[in-house]
Image (tube, rainbow, N blue to C red):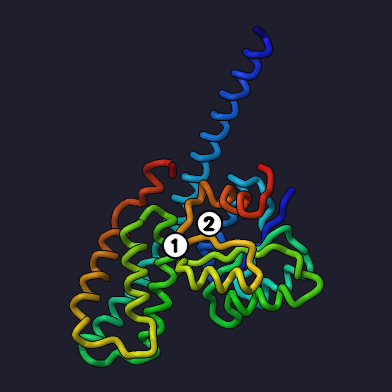
Amino acid sequence: MRRVLVIDDDEDILAISRLSLERVGGWQVLTADSGERGIEIAARERPDAVLLDAMMPGLNGPATIERLKASEETSSIPVLFLTAKLQRPERQRYVALGAAGVIAKPFDPMSLAEQMATILDWER
Amino acid sequence: MPIKHSVKMSDVEERVERNRDGDDVAEQLAVLWRRHRPEAFARVRLLEQAIAALHAGKLSDAKCEAARSAAHKLRGSAGIYGFSIAGRIAGELEDALAGDRQVAIDRAAELGGLVAKLRSDLERESPRATSRPR
């Protein structure tokens, strides 16, 4: 079973993502409410992918992916950004930081897993 | 033709299963919205307080940042629950409250109107609670 780590400071988004990815995607979901906590969990659990909120207090999305990509333990884990601001400059910046893709907020809970699977080229 | 029949049944079963999953997710979303609703309205109140302070010429940087953060969170979550108008307005409010410059006092009425529309949209019954997403 695929394992996905969702990092977002909004508990509500974590709950919705869990519901969506578990029930619709059939995946196991790990959650972290901060970039710092997310890095710890990613290094320990080595999920198949990380869904990362771009704007968080403390360590924000870009700083979090930089650390994930800089660590040997987590550098190969694909990271998808989750953002309410989906303008081209932001998207380019995230891709330049090593993101595998970008998903817009708000997302449709019924198609979040499909969006992720398409970007990551996962068979469903 | 037994094979064709078997394929047909499995299609139907798959569709039924998918509908069941969809209904289940919609129900769970409705539960999450009921749980999240008080926090969403607390965020609306933060926005209303910030606009009131702007009206009075007393919008501090801290209050403005708290309101921007509240708008950002509503922008991300309202649409997921089916409140697309609230989500769009929250985005407009976040953009208006962000940036280095102080928000101009003459925008108070306009921004107050947006917050009122946002509240009104959120006061509807959750669209996700009454119909399946998709």
Q: Which chain does tag 1 point to? A: B
**Where in the figure is residue B4, as x and y percent of width and height?**
64, 13
> Which quadrant would residue B68 be assigned to in this image?
bottom left
The residue that disc 1 covers is B77
Taking B4 as reference, is A72 left or right? right
The residue that disc 2 covers is A16
> For numbered disc 1, what is the local secondary structure?
helix
> For numbered disc 2, what is the local secondary structure?
helix
Give me the residue at 77% from left, 76% from top: A71
Q: Amino acid at mark 1?
A: Ser
Viewer-nearest residue: B77 or A100? A100
Give me the residue at 55% from left, 59% from top: A15
Taking B77 as reference, is B64 left or right? left
**Where in the figure is residue B89, as x and y percent of width and height?**
31, 66
Give me the residue at 55% from left, 39% from top: B21
Viewer-nearest residue: B57 or A88? A88
Q: Amino acid at mark 2?
A: Ile
- Residue farthest to the top, as pictured: B1
> Which quadrant would residue B7 be assigned to in this image?
top right
Asked if labels 1 and 2 touch by Cβ distance under 8 angstroms, the answer is yes
**Where in the figure is residue B87, as x and y percent of width and height?**
36, 62
